[in-house]
Amino acid sequence: MNDEIAIHWFRQDLRISDNPSLNFLSEKYDNIVAVYILDEVNCDRKMGSASKTWLHHSLLSLNEKLNNKLLVFKGNPEVVFNNLVDNYNVKQISWCRCYEPWIIKRDLNLKKNLKNKVQINSFNSSLLWEPWEVLKNDGSPYKIFTPFYKRGCLNSKPPRKPKSQEINFFNHNIKSQSIFDLELTSSKFWEKKIIKYWNIGESFASKLMNDFFSIGIQDYSEGRNFPIRKNVSRLSPYLHWGQISPHTLWYEVSNIEQEVGEKNAEIFKSELGWREFFYNLLYHFPKIQKFNLQTKFDKFPWENNNSFFDAWKKGQTGFPIVDAGMRELWETGYMHNRVRMITGSFLVKNLLIHWNQGEEWFWDCLFDADYASNSASWQWVAGTGTDSAPYFRIFNPVTQGKKFDPTGEYIRKFIPELRNFPLKYLFEPWECPPNTLKNFKLGINYPFPIVDVKTSREKALDAFAKIKVN
Ligand SMILES: Cc1cc2nc3c(=O)[nH]c(=O)nc-3n(C[C@H](O)[C@H](O)[C@H](O)COP(=O)(O)OP(=O)(O)OC[C@H]3O[C@@H](n4cnc5c(N)ncnc54)[C@H](O)[C@@H]3O)c2cc1C
């Protein structure tokens, strides 16, 4: 039997269907070996607690699909591959590209150092358009979403069509570490949340997509703004980990455009476009995870207030829509997009806390925590990014609650203390006359608001005016 092997290196493409690297290898080789490497040597940022737990379960699910043949290692990929290449007849290593700056740097080095020993190929599997393909006419990157998407993406060549084929994984006897050796499940807390709220793996991603495309998408254009409605897909963690490709979503939604309405389908596609935009920004401005894209904000007088930050993290700010969002995050590892914007704006603009702190917290708690989307969205919310909500546009947490949770169901779902609170005062409990509710006392059962909306807004605008003048 031919003992030549080809290695597919799984990274953020934890799926077998529509995987361009696997498709490529299976056309050339009989013996494909699958490898996962947890690289904490080269990374500039360790995975958050929720992400680690998601990854652990994803690897278990993938390994099951591969009949327990997934090779798992912890360490520097270059060392791992050198060992494999030196001990087995490895002809080729192939992977799907990632765009985090530290991964780009590591992969370039790896290619350079291994190219004399083995063939190496990489493929795009997670973006509809490569960041270097969508540029302005003068060759510079887009900084504003609408021209990026409409003029850039939609005028480029269409995304590749998804393609799935039978992959024959090699029945090898190569030894590796076990998934449990990666020590990804130290957080029993997130373990419980995953089991309670999510089903992990490629087949569940497809099922979720099918369920969403048969019902939820039908009122996507309107309903996606209301956190209690089932009009968003909740596919973001699966997209982040590559358990489904954006290409599959793009073409599946195109196929049902007539049934679900062109507007719903187009808006869903443009949300995938936002994801592309943020990867494009990350690729061209690789420091966005930490540094303001608009450098004038480097002088902004952020406040260091641990008790405010703690209240925000715990959902104890006294503003029900903010607290419901923060508790949704803590309870489920997910937060609805509208509420991400409200909670983010509140942290940055009403509490004057640096967006880096919010970004870090989301990074730790989100199952979809994503280097590009998280940092670029925080910059968008803070007004420090390229195409951002202007700094002076400050969400009012009371009116946002009334508008996007008009029945109060979302607030009541995540804040049990307010379950019986009258709707009239639900968005601003401090306005409720005392003794309206038996056994409820503001300040005891639910906090007083930690800031005054009007004065905190004015303070933020003053601070902004100062950096504008300077
Ligand atoms: C402060 C803040 C932090 C965020 N952090 C992340 C993050 O770490 N990871 C992440 O994937 N998204 C992040 N987002 C974007 C957005 O909130 C989520 O992608 C969305 O809520 C995911 O839910 P869904 O899958 O139900 O979305 P759907 O509405 O069903 O959209 C389908 C897919 O399109 C993409 N998408 C939708 N809206 C956006 C958007 N506004 N920006 C970028 N992509 C979008 C997502 O991949 C999503 O899964 C953040 C937004 C904010 C305001």
Image (spheres, helix red, strand yellow):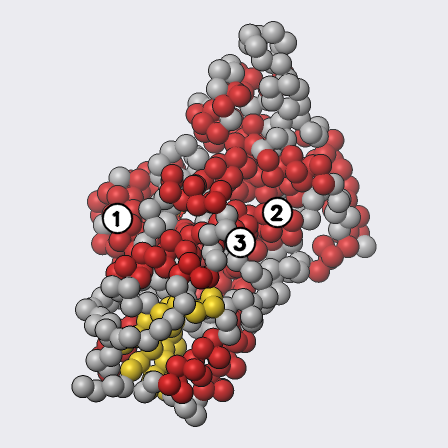
In depth, the one of 213 and 454 nearer the eye is 213
Q: Quadrant of residue 24?
A: bottom left
| Residue shown at 26% from the left, 48% from the top | 207
The residue beneath circle 3 is 48
In depth, the one of 336 and 165 nearer the eye is 165
Q: Amino acid at mark 2?
A: Gly
User: Where in the figure is residue 382, as x and y percent of width and height?
Assistant: 63, 48
Q: Is mark 2 within 8 Å of ligand 1?
A: yes
360 vs 132, left or right, is: right
Q: Nearer the viewer, mark 2 or mark 3?
A: 3
Q: Quadrant of the N terminus?
A: bottom left
Mark earlier in primary sequence (2, 1): 1
98 vs 345, left or right, is: left
Compute the Cα span from label 2 to label 1.
Answer: 32 Å
Q: Amino acid at mark 3?
A: Gly
State yes or no: discs 2 and 1 in contact (Cβ < 8 Å).
Answer: no
| Residue shown at 64% from the left, 41% from the top | 347
The residue beneath circle 2 is 358
Q: Quadrant of the C terminus?
A: bottom right
Q: Amino acid at mark 1?
A: Lys
Mark earlier in primary sequence (3, 1): 3
| Residue shown at 48% from the left, 37% from the top | 331
User: Where in the figure is residue 436, as x and y percent of width and height?
Assistant: 57, 8
